[in-house]
Amino acid sequence: MKSEIKILSDCKREIELEIETEEVTKELEKIVAQFSIRTKIPGFRPGKAPKNLIKQKFYPEIKESLINSLVPKALNSEFKAQNLNPVGMPVVNDIYFKEGEPLRIKAQFEILPGFKLPEYKKIKVKEQQISVSEQEVNQSLEELQSRSAEYTPVEGRGVADGDFVVIELKGRDTKTNKLHPTEKVVVLSGHPENEEALNQNLIGLKPGEESNFILTYDKNHQNPKLAAKKIDYNLKVTSIKEKKLPKINNEFAKDHGEFESLKDLKKEIRNEIKVSKDKAAKMEMAEEIVKKIYANLNICLPETLIEQEYMAILKRHIAALPQQKELIKEDFEKLKNEAKIKAEQNIKNHLILKKIAEEENIDVPEDEIDEELKAIAKANNVPLAQVVESVNKEGKREDLRNNLLLKKTVDFLVENAIIE
């Protein structure tokens, strides 16, 4: 097999391959035989039809099978021989095939760029001032209180804001009189993401009571089945539960860990907030360091990596939007632009940190991965065996190793920085 590789840029290459006639002919005969066996030709038993007839009848399919069989193997073989690790799938943009001649292909692919790091030690960064206010501690206490709430059935009154209400909702299109399927849903009364008409009509209703209201939906509503429609709703309250918060006192503290008093619980919360802020400050300093490093670098970024990261960020941004928020074109374009900028920054950061880890021989031994798995199990209050099984099943162990490697590299950069 002959090959030639051209350098198009720091991270883009073009390869021209020529697969020898003998190998092409052998594979072609094999594929023709397979077609002959599995297809029915009138007047011939399976596998007995003349090869020329099979080629004539199924030539496009045979050619496609030949290319799909030979090209990936040839490319992978050559990449291995040349010690190349393409990023993403190579793009084949030229194929020449004629029976009795070599198969020639031309493909482009991307690789991680090679670059030389500038000085990355003793970079000056601003010290982050860390403090934890009493208000932050109290806010965390209130969040813990809210998570510990009990929901008890309501008696003797109707729906109030903040109640969890089970309702049956029936809808009818006022234009077509078409009935929508009855929905049984749980709603939080008064929640700002609810339709205002729903909140207004819920208030005061007791279990078994009903209310009717009409909603006119905007033509750009996120649910196309409702867009530009006028729906006459009937809602019926099935049950009501109210949220009861426990008192924040010494007993509350004892119920949430090995704490003798509320004072001990608040001390632990303050410490957890400080640890979280320390991590955030360290990450912020590391980002400042990396920015100063790549300010002096001109790195070619593989488009494949940028696109993958861009799509992941964009999906996260869209998923974080309020469910009922309608995303107009201008907002979507802004999200796309922000995601593209962030994707390029993330890829640059990743490449620089990986390069520094290589330069400093930073690695992650197996025992550190095991300790991280234990920490994940503890934080999520699940058995260690379950976490290990999940990580192994999803093939995430190497991802975990890479994340730990980047964290250790971040720690190294901050430890070797000049903090002013």
Image: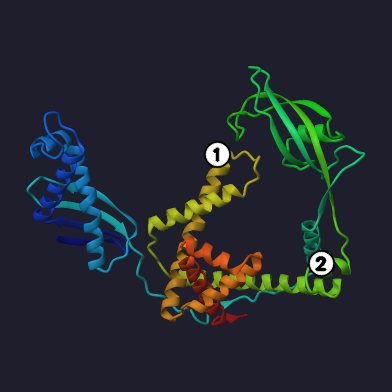
Q: Position of residue 130 (x, y in %)?
A: 71, 74
**130, above or below 300, in the image:** below
* Horizontal side of residue 401 vs 74, given as left or right: right
- Asked whether residue 410 appears in the rendered view, the answer is no
Q: Position of residue 160 (x, y in %)?
A: 86, 41
Residue at the image point whose x is 8% and y is 50% from the top: 101
Q: Which residue is mark 2?
A: 255
Q: How is the protein colored in the picture?
A: rainbow
Q: Which of the 4 image quadrants contains residue 351?
A: bottom left
Q: Which residue is mark 1?
A: 329
Q: In the picture shown, does residue 340 fall above or below 137?
A: above
In percent of the image, x 81 and y 60: which residue is there? Answer: 145
Q: Secondary structure at mark 2?
A: loop
**Residue at the limit of the structure toward the top, as seen here:** 176
Which amino acid lies under the numbered mark 2 shown in the image of this protein? Asp
Q: Dot 1 surroundings within 10 Å: few (below 14), some, or many (20 or more)?
A: few
Q: What amino acid is at disc 1?
A: Lys
**Secondary structure beneath label 1:** helix
Whether residue 179 sits left or right of residue 13 in the image: it is right
Say whether residue 172 is visible: yes
